[in-house]
Image: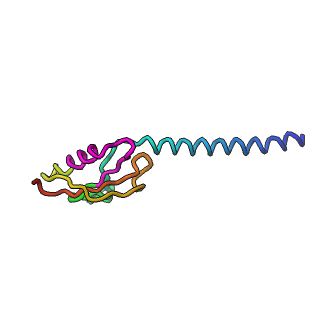
Amino acid sequence: MTTNATTSAPRALIGKGTLWLSMGMLVLGMSGCGGAPYIDSRREAGQTGMVGASTPDRVAICYSSQSTTPAEVQKLADSECAKTGRTARFSHQQQVVCNLANPTRAFFNCVANP
């Protein structure tokens, strides 16, 4: 009985290590895939004001540079600014601020059409 108790402990540790390694590989794999870009314009339930990074004058788009081109991000920003009759002009971006699938946030100012 003593040998079984001794051998089961290392097996349990190996099982846990394999689980953590598998979870880590899954997270790393998902971070390279990238999801569809989206406008960061969250709202609180029952309130009209935005709590996300976007405002009516500044559009914030979360995206992955691995799966989204700059032209696609610009097009999404242009479509959002077009709702108020304006066009989007790139301002700046931040890294690792949205989520694992879309870690980059790009900011565009909505400006009057030329």
For the C terminus, the quadrant is bottom left
Q: Which residue is drawn at 31% across and 51% down?
A: 61
Image location (x, y in percent) of residue 60: 29, 55
Check the image and tell me how it is coloured.
rainbow
Specify whether residue 64 is painted magenta: yes
Residue 96 at x, y percent in the picture: 42, 55
Look at 84% across and 44% down and name the residue there: 6
Q: Left of 6 or right of it: where is 37?
A: left
User: Which residue sits at x=12%, y=51%?
Assistant: 85
6 vs 51, nearest the viewer: 6
34 in magenta: no
**Left or right: 79 in relation to 32:** left
Residue 19: give x, y in percent of width and height: 63, 42
Q: From the image, which quarter does the N terminus lie in?
A: top right
In the rendering, at what x and y percent does residue 113 appear? 11, 53
Q: How many marks?
A: 0
- On the question of residue 20 being in view, the answer is yes
Question: Considering only vertical position in the picture, is 11 above or below 52?
Answer: above
Q: What stretch is highlighted in magenta?
A: 60-79
x 57%, y 45%: residue: 24
Residue 9 is left or right of residue 82, and the answer is right
- Residue 41 visible: no
Left or right: 59 as drawn, with respect to 6: left
In the image, 26 versus 72, the foreground residue is 72
Q: Which of 16 and 73 is in front in this view?
A: 73
In the displayed image of the protein, which residue is found farthest to the left?
Answer: 114
